[in-house]
Image (spheres, grey):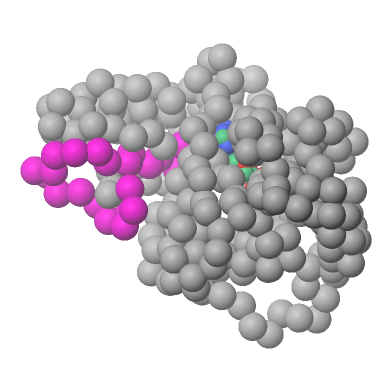
Amino acid sequence: MARTVAELKTQLADLRIERPSAPVVFVPTMGALHDGHRALMTQASHYNGISVASIFVNPTQFGPDEDLAKYPRTWEADLQLCADEGIDVVFAPTVDQMYGDRTESTLSAGPLGTRLEGAQRPGHFDGVVTVVAKLFDMVHPNRAIFGQKDAQQVAVIRAMVRDLELPVEIEAFPTVRDSDGLAMSSRNVYLSDTEREQALAIPRALVAAYQAGSEGAQAVLKAATNELAGEPEVHVRYVELVHPDTLEAVSPTFHGHALLLIAAMVGTTRLIDNSMVTVG
Ligand code: AMP
């Protein structure tokens, strides 16, 4: 485990001497690890490389009224999960290591980061691209693995890597769900039993939307909206059917693969989920 950038560099240098041609595969996380994170780590192990996971609750991607202070922290269990998955280096820097007083210059996620989640969480994706770029610069991964659960995050990071010409392959791994269909999330621990039951309207809406795919874009949106409307305690923040790369809304006559994105509040917990839908 590395707490400082210096420790990280030493551990990576030692591993590179042992395995000079192994690719460095990186899984960034905010900890409170669950089976969704585990799947990314299992995927990382398939490259027979040097695997690095980071655990860092990044303050700059939280808004002033968000859950930074209460974000779940399960340190011992996280380390055990990383060990079980054969992660070579766990990088868990302090906020001071990551930022110190070096907060003058930040990256902007651009227009892609101002839509959907970005419209409702101003500055969120600027915080994400800034921390991910810093982590990439520290870890120097050949490949980094993210979850499709955070589809807009994947799009924003792909755009950053393309625009800044960073030498890293970005891979997106499918969303891992609990047996009841709810997408795994570190924030699910905030849900009461009742809220969790109510939250299942979200995966149900994705299934309904998927099934309506052949009837066109408007039918897809209607199917999702109707399903969500059946659960009044799920307060929808957005339901949008978008092009997967640009995140622009598809036209009513669109045919092809589109991404259906849902965000909703259940009690005080903000949940997001998404699914690809074949439209037309
Ligand atoms: P987080 O710790 O929430 O910042 O997530 C770290 C990484 O795990 C991100 O790339 C997420 O998209 C991914 N992730 C979170 N939940 C899931 C899930 N249920 N299935 C797959 N990947 C996930």
From the viewer's side, name the closer residue of 82 and 189: 82
In the orientation shown, which residue stands out farthest toward the bottom? Answer: 104
Where's ligand 1: which quadrant? top right
Q: Is residue 101 visible?
A: yes
| The residue stretch that appears in magenta | 244-273
Eyeballing the image, is 186 above or below 128?
Answer: above
Residue 105 lies within the magenta run: no
Residue 236 x/y as whole percent: 41, 40
Residue 34 x/y as whole percent: 70, 31
Residue 267 x/y as whole percent: 58, 36
Q: Quadrant of residue 217?
A: top left
From the viewer's side, name the closer residue of 19 and 197: 19
Residue 168 x/y as whole percent: 56, 59
Q: Residue at x 38, y 34 (%)?
A: 275
Q: Is residue 3 left or right of residue 272?
A: right
Q: Is residue 24 left or right of residue 175?
A: right
Q: Is residue 150 visible?
A: no
